Image (tube, rainbow, N blue to C red):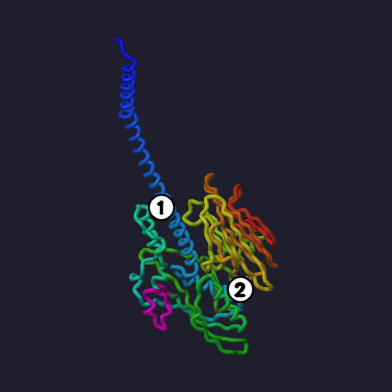
Amino acid sequence: MNLTKREKVLLFILLLTIAFYGYYNYLYLPKYSKYLSIKGELEDRKLLELKLQRSLRDSEDIRTVLNSLKIKVRELDKIIPSKVYQEEVILLLKDIFERNNINFTSISFSMLKNGENLEKNIEPSLDIMIKEYEKLLKGEKTDILKYKTLKEDKEDKENQKKSDEGIYNQGLEYLNVNVNFSSDYSNLKSALLEFERSKRKIIVKNISIANNKEGVIGSMSLQFPYYPVLGEAKKEELDFKGQYGNPQPFMSHFPIEQGESQVQKNKKKNSDDEGEEKVSINSDFYMIIKPISSDMPTVTIGKSPYRYTAIYADNPNFENTKLHLKQEKTKLYYRYENSLYSYPDDNSFEEFTIDGEKIVLKIYSQPRLNYKDNSGVILNIANDTDIGLDVYIYDDDRDNPRIKINPENGNINILKISS
């Protein structure tokens, strides 16, 4: 069959059209539809990724808040504990009075409650925080800006109910201690100053004194507040083993047996090694270093005693932190900062005083858990004062230390102590 040139061209156009139609309908369109489907799925996954990243940031914020709250709860428990013991108070007062040469002839105790039903207390905000965090893990929305402390909640509801004599916080109970004493007036002032600076909250309710030939005699009423735990409380026992005082109280010439309690023995645990007797010195600053797996932040640094001056960081690796001390005439100032926070937070310095001859920083570390445990701190210290800085490092890992100190300038003495 002979085809003309024109027929050949038309046949070629027909075949080309059929081929293009088949390619478009049976190859291109299915591939393009699949491309659009994958593209839409990719965009959905990108949106999901953004939501997950946002949720992770929110959960990290809440986890940081939780860790900070746990630190504050532990520190606040040192100031106002959940339980107070008469034996503990006796030993505390005995140490303070002996250091200030005060003789106390009698001591008596009584309990004081607020009078409110403790079961009606507002739920602690830490419990609320944990519940909100669990909601977040389940995908429910939450707002970390709405949290208020328990103190703020109470103040909002009780400001109108407070009278001039309403000096007790709801839920607090007090151990009242009445002490009769004799002393020199200057020694009495020193003891009162020690009460004020004590890490433990001690309230001097009232004091009365009178002159005598040897100085002053009088009595004082002290209060030791504590916040009782509702429901099932953890049972705590204090071990006061040992003999105290004179075994024959009616024979003044009888030698006194110097017994030691378990509490006193624990305080002397490390005092046998050379140089470790300085460990008993109260610190001016403290630092706590933990592994990333801990509920607490990996790095905490603050001023002693705890007064909401601590800053935190939760870093799986080494965190850069700086402590800067300076002196203006006779006044001392401090400032510390890390990659996230600083105190004070406005590039200024905070004034402080010291009780001893040197400034003391105590660092509490712990051995590493495994090869994946890499958290630690690089501490840069600038001591621009005329006073030496003693740094005590407790229980750091010997092979791979968590703490690396970089003394920038000044008199800095570093002592490592292992239990």
At x 31%, y 13%, the residue is 3
Instruction: Please say whether residue 164 is one of the residues in the magenta stretch.
Output: yes
Asked where in the image residue 61 lies, by quadrant, the reply is bottom left
Label 2, secondary structure: give it. Answer: loop
Q: Counting residues from the N terminus, which is met first, the one under dot 2 or under dot 1?
A: 1
Kindly tell me whether residue 33 is visible in this rendering.
Answer: yes
Kindly tell me whether residue 283 is visible in this rendering.
Answer: no
Seen in the picture, residue 170 relative to 217 is either above or below; the reply is above
What span is colored magenta in the figure? 155-173
Q: Give the image location of residue 23, x and y in percent.
A: 33, 27
Crowding around mark 1 (Cα neighbors within 10 Å: few <14, some 14 to 19, many 20+) is some
At x 63%, y 69%, the residue is 333
Q: Give the image location of residue 181, x and y in percent.
A: 55, 82
Seen in the picture, residue 383 relative to 38 is either above or below; the reply is below
**Image quadrant for the C terminus?**
bottom right
Label 2 to label 1, Cα distance in Å? 70 Å
Q: Nearer the viewer, residue 287 or 339?
A: 339
Crowding around mark 2 (Cα neighbors within 10 Å: few <14, some 14 to 19, many 20+) is few
At x 47%, y 77%, the residue is 223
Seen in the picture, residue 107 relative to 145 is either above or below; the reply is below
Q: Is 139 on the left or on the right of 260, as rendered?
A: left
**Which residue is tagged 1?**
55
Q: Give the image location of residue 149, x and y in percent.
A: 42, 67
Q: Is 220 on the left or on the right of 414, as rendered?
A: left
Number of numbered markers: 2
